[in-house]
Amino acid sequence: MINLQKLFADVFDPHPGETALVLIDIPHGNITDTADWAERRTMAQRWHAALRDFGQQRGFHVLPLACYPATGAHNAQLPDKGLLGDTPTPLAQLAAQATLILAMTQFSASAPLMEWTKRRPVLRAASMPLVAPAMEATALAADYAEIARACAALHQRLSNAQAARITFSNGDRLLLDIRFRTPHVDDGQLRPDKTPPRLVNLPSGETYVACYEGEQTTIPSQTQGVLPVPWRNEIVRLEIAQNRVVEVLGLSDAAADLRNFLALDGARRNVAELGLGCNPHARVRGNILEDEKAGPHIALGRSDHIGGVIGPTAFEDPAHIWHQDFVYARESPIYVTDLTLIDAENRADQLVYQGEYLLHAMMAAK
């Protein structure tokens, strides 16, 4: 059984006088409940009780459990109002009260939570979409000091890179342009003195960078190739040019469904992110929160919360806002067989071979 108070101390280190908030989303209308979602809400109640007990020991305040109507989409903007306990309360008011937020939600709130932390520098947030009790025995139980070292090593290598050259296990190849971008780490360190960005996913363990999206009018993005993605239990191949999906290949029902989904809003076609998951306890189980910490992943859609330029105003309708990670760890249906970083002098730094990180990739330079 996980020691939640140790986890809270290791990751958050709440100080006396702080105010913590546990936030959940709830089903409504056409957004129907699931067994996993109901289990997550029960898990949130257990974590809230443990956090409240820890607060009594350390001298920080824990607000009543808060909730809001689910958005129905990952990284969509949050509604204006929710409930603090049984009391209707504007979510902005909750953000103004808290210094620490744990969002244990069905639909990722990472992007709007990141906006909250930018507006209120004393606030830090842990986004935990799709978190499940099973993770308490795997990725949540990791040694976060070890994870921080691995993230730092990958950060150093991404900082020196201009592009990432990727080959997938089905033979597809993709070049990601990461010029003009700064990599970040999600290493499970969310203490009061954390420097921006003051948000992590939990369980943590990745270094990530937004892709260059061609916003400089005279410098087109060089991202190009084919990206295979799991969609509706099939692999659908996407043709990429200048950092955009330009064609969904194939005639299957899954391909048609993804083609229609991307055609609904051009901002969904944006190649948003390269992530390098490095939590050694993470398991690929079909849950994106943990899966993405097990190996490389690539995201489409919104990118402003990770250092890119595609934000809510880039979408034609707020209901279309979307950011989705696709995972290519060794245990995934499609995995990365080669990931090599290329620097400004065209020197190669291979990080992944046959689905596994090479030893040098996980060791920080002396």
Image (tube, rainbow, N blue to C red):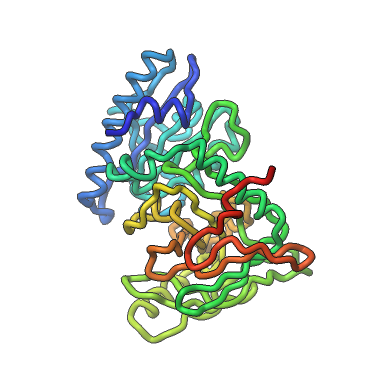
Residue 41 percent across, percent down from the top left: 27, 39
Whether residue 31 is situated above or below residue 95 in the rendered picture: below
Total number of numbered labels? Answer: 0
Based on the displayed image, in which of its 4 quarters is residue 44 positioned?
top left
Q: Is residue 87 visible?
A: no
The residue lying at 46 percent from left, 59 percent from top is 325
- Comparing 188 with 36, the one in front is 188
The residue lying at 23 percent from left, 43 percent from top is 39
The residue lying at 49 percent from left, 50 percent from top is 278
Q: Is residue 3 visible?
A: yes
- Comparing 356 with 276, the one in front is 356
Q: Residue furthest left?
A: 35
Residue 357 percent across, percent down from the top left: 53, 58
Residue 8 percent across, percent down from the top left: 41, 28
Q: Is residue 61 left or right of residue 183?
A: left
For the N terminus, the quadrant is: top left
Whether residue 297 is situated above or below residue 98 in the rendered picture: below
The residue lying at 44 percent from left, 25 percent from top is 9
Q: Is residue 36 left or right of residue 360?
A: left
Whether residue 85 is situated above or below residue 57 in the rendered picture: below
For the C terminus, the quadrant is: top right
Residue 113 percent across, percent down from the top left: 49, 41
- Comparing 139 with 270, the one in front is 139
